[in-house]
Image (cartoon, rainbow, N blue to C red):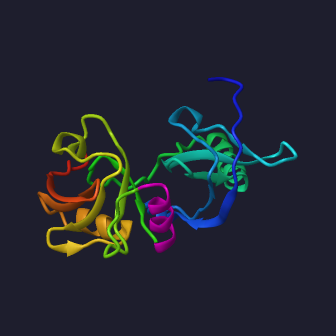
Amino acid sequence: MSNTVTSGVVSSVQRPSEELGLKGRDINYIQTDAAITFGNSGGPLVNLDGEAIGINSMKVTPGISFAIPIDYARNFLKLAEEKVKKGKSSVDNTPKRRYMGITMLSLTHEIIAELKQRGSQIPDAIQNGILVWKVILNSPSHTSGLMAGDIILNINNKDVAQSADIYEILASNTKVLDMIVLRNGQLMKISVAPENPE
């Protein structure tokens, strides 16, 4: 709904992009427990003085959300404006990668502890993994049954602890990714066949 403001606490201003599964981005995200829905993405994160300090980017679970610091947004707009003036597209030279269709978050001890506090059924034996926080409709992951909230623990008999592990497996051109996934406290097997870039 428009003209809606929620309040929350900023718990970290230095959450590296690698921990969120965002490879190739040198950004330290702001972590907040302010209520952010998918409709709020792109809206401002403001301080008590009404100053925009970030752009709401993603919600992992109620109470764990992330925003792009405003300085990065300013730099991005400046670079984009310079490219337009030079007649270059902002997507030039973008490398093409195999496509699974998920947005993911590398789980740290701190994030696992926060998820447990909010009722997630994560056994104590699990110390890391990859949280699937969004699955794209009709993507390979969606058609294979992967769901938002799943935690990927193992792919093709290899434990995965951070998003870089998944990028490495995708780069190996393995045709099928046989995953061990934790869902609602239960382990299950899911196989995903990534799409090759066109």
**Quadrant in which residue 124 is drawn:** bottom left
Percent coordinates x, y for residue 2 in the rendering? 66, 23
Stretch of the chain drawn in magenta = 109-119
- 72 in relation to 13, above or below: above
Q: Nearer the viewer, residue 94 or 170?
A: 170
Counting from the top left corner in percent of width and height, residue 160 is at 29, 71
Q: Disc count in the image?
A: 0
Q: Nearer the viewer, residue 125 or 159?
A: 125
Q: Quadrant of the C terminus?
A: top left
Q: Is residue 190 left or right of residue 103?
A: left
Do we see residue 18 in this rendering? no
Q: Residue, x 16% and y 52% (percent of image)?
A: 192
Is 99 above or below relative to 38?
below
Task: Identify which residue, 173 or 33, lies in the foreground.
Answer: 33
Q: Is residue 181 visible?
A: yes
Residue 52 falls inside the magenta stretch:
no
Looking at the image, which residue is at 49% across and 60% down? 117
Q: Nearer the viewer, residue 82 or 67?
A: 67
Percent x, y of residue 152: 28, 61
Q: Main secondary structure of the magenta part?
A: helix
Q: Residue lying farthest right?
A: 49
Q: Position of residue 113 (x, y in %)?
A: 48, 68
Residue 111 belongs to the span the image colors magenta: yes
Left or right side of 126 for 91: right
Q: Residue at x 33, y 49 (%)?
A: 102
For the N terminus, the quadrant is top right
Specify whether 75 is left or right of 94.
Answer: right
